[in-house]
Image (cartoon, helix red, strand yellow):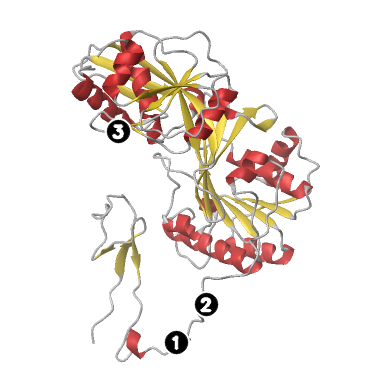
Amino acid sequence: MAKSTNAFTCTACGASHKKWAGRCDACGAWNTIVEEAPLSQGPGRGLGAHKGRAVPLSSLQTTEAPPPRSLSGMEELDRVLGGGLVPGSAVLIGGDPGIGKSTLLLQGAAAFARRGANAVYISGEEASAQVRMRAQRLGLADAPVRLGSETNLRDILTTLDNERPDLAIIDSVQTLWSDQVEAAPGSVAQVRAAAHELVTFAKRKGVAIFLVGHVTKDGQIAGPRVVEHMVDTVIYFEGERGHQFRILRSVKNRFGPADEIGVFEMTGAGLAEVANPSALFLSERGQPVPGSAVFAGIEGTRPVLTEVQALVAPSTLASPRRTVVGLDSGRVSTILAVLEARCGIPFAGLDVFLNVAGGMRVSEPAADLAIAGALLSAREDSALPPEAVLFGEISLSGALRPVAQAENRLKEAQKLGFSQAILPDSQKVEGAGGMGVSRIADLTGFVGEVFGAG
């Protein structure tokens, strides 16, 4: 009788391996292969021999009402959650150390509690006295939030089962440990077991749970990717240490739109909501200078105007530098190649620096035209029209392609005082709202019309 041998599985991609290795050949991740015992399957125990319970099936039609939502009163937080907090939902929030995750969740717990929700805050990283000190600094000492400090998963689940809160915050999932898993706290096995038990408890008891997750140096939530599949919502809290702005970005939401953002400003009294992020990101714009272009973007369902800044300078290095902050560096390299191949404008021997003002991160392809405009403006030392906004996707042939929600972009730009828009020739716009629209077919036409060169 053959002995059953343990299998080795990658926690990042799920690939199976015959033996342990430091690097997964399928996805390239390091230190993600763990040993797992296989399911026992003796003679006559195959899938065809199993007599299980029939699963009840139903149609797609339903008369059930949409799930009720609880509002915190923090409009930016409620927007990212999809319009409020759904009972029984599991939310995973990640961010760099010290970016303000604990501050955000403490303010959120206080906001929900003041509206009648039964909120519990369990800290595994700080003592209760430290959390109370933060609450006093934020002016939340009188909020009816119940506080605990524990890392034992069994004790936490027992406490939540006895208290039956509406909202439970666990800070953080990497500090929890289960006595049924023989691994150190923070390991892949412990994080997976803790997340599974907490999400199952949330669904069974109808308790909304926030899980705080650490991030790796690449900005991804640490631990197995299966945790992100377990939860209903995945949120990242982003920002630069040198800026006071913080972006709360949803990348997965089963109860609302993904890629929704909320904007906060870090102050001495905690996080303050920013109702008009476009005005905030453009507040320091002065006289028109070369290398500056205003991009009319869409983040989730809201239009946001941001400033793309570029600097082009002669390089003394054999390989010129390409420094990009807040943008996709691969996308920038593609735009530089299109400018050289289709427009005959070389950037060889030139250092290129690109930045999005205010610590904002832009991943939309619609920002291609604004990036090209900023680069050309910096290279030619010629400022773009200060009253103009730009948006449009650049193809490898140099043609400009239309983007979605052009009307919302133009309305936001007009609200902030912009009177001109430069966009693709094929872009359909149902009324520009009184704005002057310059339509351009390709990148060569953009160079000729804006900078007077062909």
Check disc 3: other Cα within 10 Å, few if <14, some if 14-19, many if 20+: few
> Of all residues shown, which one is farthest toward the right?
142
Please identify, in this view, whether the residue under mark 2 or under mark 3 is nearer the observer: 2
Q: Which amino acid lies under the numbered mark 3 shown in the image of this protein?
A: Gly
Question: Counting residues from the N terminus, which is met first, the one under dot 1 or under dot 3?
Answer: 1
Nearer to the camera, 226 or 162: 226
Residue beneath label 2, please?
58
Q: Which amino acid lies under the numbered mark 1 shown in the image of this protein?
A: Gly
Where in the figure is residue 51, as x and y percent of width and height? 42, 90
Q: Quadrant of the C terminus?
A: top left
Where in the figure is residue 242, as x and y percent of width and height? 52, 23
- What residue is rendered at 37% in x and 8% in y? 382
Q: Which amino acid lies under the numbered mark 2 shown in the image of this protein?
A: Ser
Where in the figure is residue 18, as x and y percent of width and height? 23, 66
Check disc 1: other Cα within 10 Å, few if <14, some if 14-19, many if 20+: few
Task: Report whether residue 184 is seen.
Answer: no
Marks 1/2: CA–CA distance? 19 Å
Question: Counting residues from the N terminus, which is met first, the one under dot 1 or under dot 2?
Answer: 1
Where in the figure is residue 121, as x and y percent of width and height? 68, 51
Residue beneath label 1, please?
52
